[in-house]
Image (cartoon, helix red, strand yellow):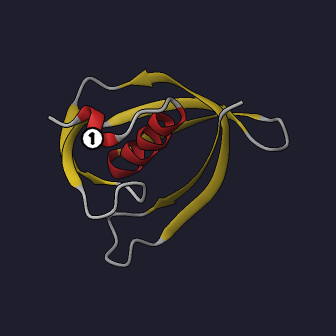
Amino acid sequence: MRIAAVTQRDTSKKNRELLEEFVMINPILIGKGDETVIDEEACLSLPKITGKVARPLDITIKYQTIDGKTHIKKATGYNARILLHEMDHLDGVLFIDKLV
């Protein structure tokens, strides 16, 4: 079983207002857009280290919640990047493994 807790924020607002917090169990990437964006990433696992990583701008994932319900979530931009970053952790991959 693969489990990650995620916080999504509204990055269009200056205060990065909280959109939602949720737990995803056994998430899988089921779709991604053609556009890729290279942006800076960091990680609490590697304090004071940052680097540029290429990620799809838009993604769709499928996961289960703690109550066993299946969800499909679309995410874009920074929030898509967060989901992929956390899913990488579940596969034993750190952002430094994907530096461009």
Q: Residue at x 53, y 63 (%)?
A: 19
Judged left or right of residue 2, residue 48 is left
4 or 79: which is nearer to us?
Answer: 4
The x, y position of residue 7, in whole percent, is: 54, 59
Would you identify the image quadrant in which residue 42 lies?
A: bottom left
Residue at the spot of label 1: 96
Amino acid type of the residue that numbered disc 1 sits on in the rendered structure: Ile
Would you identify the image quadrant in which residue 80 lies?
A: top left
Q: Secondary structure at mark 1?
A: helix
Question: Is residue 56 at least partly visible in the picture?
Answer: no
Q: Residue at x 37, y 78 (%)?
A: 15
* Quarter placement of the C terminus: top left
Judged left or right of residue 51, residue 13 is right
- Residue 17 versus residue 41 in the image, above or below: below
43 or 24: which is nearer to us?
Answer: 43
22 or 72: which is nearer to us?
Answer: 22
Neighbour tally class for label 1: few under 14, some 14-19, many 20 plus, Cα within 10 Å: some
Q: Residue at x 41, y 33 (%)?
A: 93
The x, y position of residue 29, in whole percent, is: 50, 25
Question: Is residue 38 at least partly visible in the picture?
Answer: yes
Residue furthest to the left: 100
Q: Residue at x 29, y 33 (%)?
A: 97
The x, y position of residue 30, in whole percent, is: 51, 21
97 or 59: which is nearer to us?
Answer: 97
Judged left or right of residue 31, residue 6 is right
Residue furthest to the right: 67
The x, y position of residue 1, in whole percent, is: 72, 30
